[in-house]
Image (tube, rainbow, N blue to C red):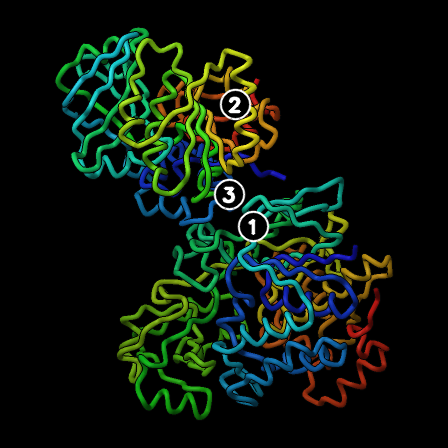
Amino acid sequence: MSRSFFECIDVGSENCPCYLAETGDCLTCSRLAGLDYCDCKWQGVCIYNEFNWNGKKVKNPREEIATEIIAKKNYKGNIHILVLQGSKYLCQRFKFPGTFIFARNSDYKEIYEVPLSIMYVDSEKDQIHIAVKVISAKTKALMESNQKLLIKGPYRNGIIGLKALEKNKEGKMLILCRNMGLAPAVKLIDFYKDKKEIDLIMDDYRLEENFAQSYFDKLGIIPIRKNFKRDDDLQEIKKLIEEGSYDSTLIFTSDKYISIFEKLMEDKKNIAILNNSNMCCGEGICGACSYVDKNGEVIKMCKCQMKAKDKQKGGI
Amino acid sequence: MNRVVIIGSGWSGCSAAVTAKKAGADVVLLERTDMILGLGNVGGIMRNNGRFTACEENIQLGAGDLFHITDRLSRHVNIDFPGHKHASLYDVSKIEYEVRKYLLDMGIDIQLQSRVVDVEKKDSIIENLILENDEIIEGDVFIECTGSTGPMGNCLEYGNGCCMCIVRCPSFGPRVSISKKCGVDDIMGQRKDGSYGAFSGSCKLDKGSLSEDVVKQLNKTGVVILPVNKEDINESKLQMKVCQQYALREYAENIILLDTGHAKLMSSFVPLDKLRKIKGLEKAKYIDPYSGGKGNSIRYLSMAPRDNFMKINGVDNLFCGGEKSGLFVGHTEAITTGALAGHNSVRYLKGLRQLNLPNQLATGDIIAYANENIDKEEGLSMRYTFAGSDYFKRMKEKNLYTTDVEEIKKRVKKLNLDNIYEEKLL
């Protein structure tokens, strides 16, 4: 009766146990959350054991790494693609769906860190592609840099409902994406292109220039172009979903369109959505990404993985 | 629907499955790992001291099925070793397959790699169990046989950390206390010094790593006793172990090996360098737990308060068996408690009066005696086994201990309980 519906995205990873273990706030281990008995559902090496073996300290805290900006391509509408020179080590960790980083210009303080989806990883050149839309202080500061960026990662919780993807390692996948949601869609397609049959429905009507098109071309995917604001288009999408027999659907849009599409879909089981929470520290410490679910439980969205339908049901 | 769902397929869970099935229920046996029998896969000792009596009582009560298998698979019968007489040693390499086959042939639905992580409850009734993969398991009555060993956090907090035992928490996930999920607090056993839990009492050595002489004697007689070097004798370690029937001076001064297929080392753990100083063990290697030189699994941290019908207090349709039901040690004790829980679960379904095994039988007496003592502070540091320590003494004092099979038959018959577990209730 005490079971939470979420799982920590970092559990069992090289970054577990994390800062929350040190403060007695672990999202998984009861002992590292102040209780004096074992009551966890983690099916892997005991976090409490790992914490003790690590001298009761955070394991592999994410640290900033200076990366060279190899290329900067500017698109209309103040969107930019940055190509960063990473390392094999980083690129291997950044290739998974839902991965994001924090990046900042080294001339600015840490409060200028921007959470950014990894758009594409070039494994041959060990390069990382990220898309940035300049909006306000943080992104403006970031784009002032032309030579180096400090990046920190991997952070893993960019997609809510990841289990919907893992459950169907082969199969047919639909991606619905809009505006900056095109960036994580690129990586997802790259990750699954050899494993799944993928259909992509894209709304780029609000973009002055489609920054992702060249990537879609390279990955051999032909997007179906729709305007998510038009009812006729939504009805056509509904029909496509009904006829497509997809075993997973990904919605990479703002929360407004996530709700619209969820209402359109009859089978809500295998849905994954973009985690649109306000990422601030990424470590579950600051609380900026928290929401309170219907039971009054505070969920830290930078760390908590759940079914997409539970996320949509819960928050206030 | 008359569905009995048993959580955990160690000896007590298997025993509960057998008696519930015999009483006519549909039985589902859920197991966290890929093998049934749990610690029964590394045990092996049967019929020693008062366990002989308990075994024969169970046979007369109609729960002889599992004992017949252990008897059939015994590598050695009627052997003595320090403090113990007329023991049988079953082959741990063969037991799992045979018991599994027997249960399947009975029509018991065994679901492996099905770890229960939570319950859905209405008032004081469990309606469903929830598995790790969110699957919902429906049932009318439930029997918790999840044991009390591990998980890793407990082995670290109260022991020497994970020693890679047969429980295999990292591979299959930690044990979950179902009664605790129902809101019933677990009772934690203590050692004499007041600390919690106890070390499992034995390890297995790879026979192939022992000297030819040791292996030859083991295969022939079932027992090898090797003196420990004087400077390495550590009697204080006896207090740490769960099996108080083996917490004897001889077990500190000697290395006692029994042949259960592997070489069963009757100590919680012995550092490998010390072990290898002993003649015949120069090349010894642990195979259970893999880090038996460092420690062993920690047990007795998760008992549920129950009545003498084996029903857990506070939950109407949850019974328990094995270590979950008290500070019991051993397979015979697990089979005894499991059998009663399985039978009474069907009586609950049928709305019949529950069976209380009388204290004229050792099997009934131990269930009641363990329950009486669990509320007392000193009771938490006691262990209950037919095979030794305080309870075997009590058995002898109460004239319950006998190896006369005819006498045991008479006792059970006199109580009108012969083959009670064979009775089909549904």
Q: Are marks 2 and 3 in contact (CB under 8 Å)?
A: no
Q: Position of residue B373 (x, y in %)?
A: 67, 60
Q: Position of residue B363 (x, y in %)?
A: 71, 73
As helix, strand or loop, the secondary structure at mark 3 comes to loop
- The residue that disc 2 covers is A237
Q: Residue at x 39, y 27 (%)?
A: A158
Which residue is at the front of the view, B255 or B9? B9
Task: Name the quadrant containing residue B65.
Answer: bottom right
Of the numbered discs in the image, which one, if any, rests on residue B176? 1
Which residue is at the front of the view, A133 or B366? A133
Of the numbered discs in the image, which one, if any, rests on residue A36? 3
Work out how far the residue at label 2 is from the one at label 3, CA to CA, in angstroms: 52 Å
Circle count: 3
Q: Nearer the viewer, mark 2 or mark 3?
A: 2
- On the same chain, marks 2 and 3? The answer is yes
Quadrant in the picture for the C terminus of chain B = bottom right
Q: Nearer the viewer, mark 1 or mark 3?
A: 1
B299 lies above or below A206: below
Q: Residue at x 62, y 55 (%)?
A: B303
Q: Position of residue B198 (x, y in %)?
A: 50, 61
Amino acid on which the number 1 mark rests in the picture: Val
Q: B348 left or right of B173?
A: right
Quadrant in the picture for the N terminus of chain B = bottom right
Amino acid on which the number 2 mark rests in the picture: Ile
Q: Can residue B337 be seen in the rendering of this structure?
A: no
Q: A98 left or right of A293?
A: left
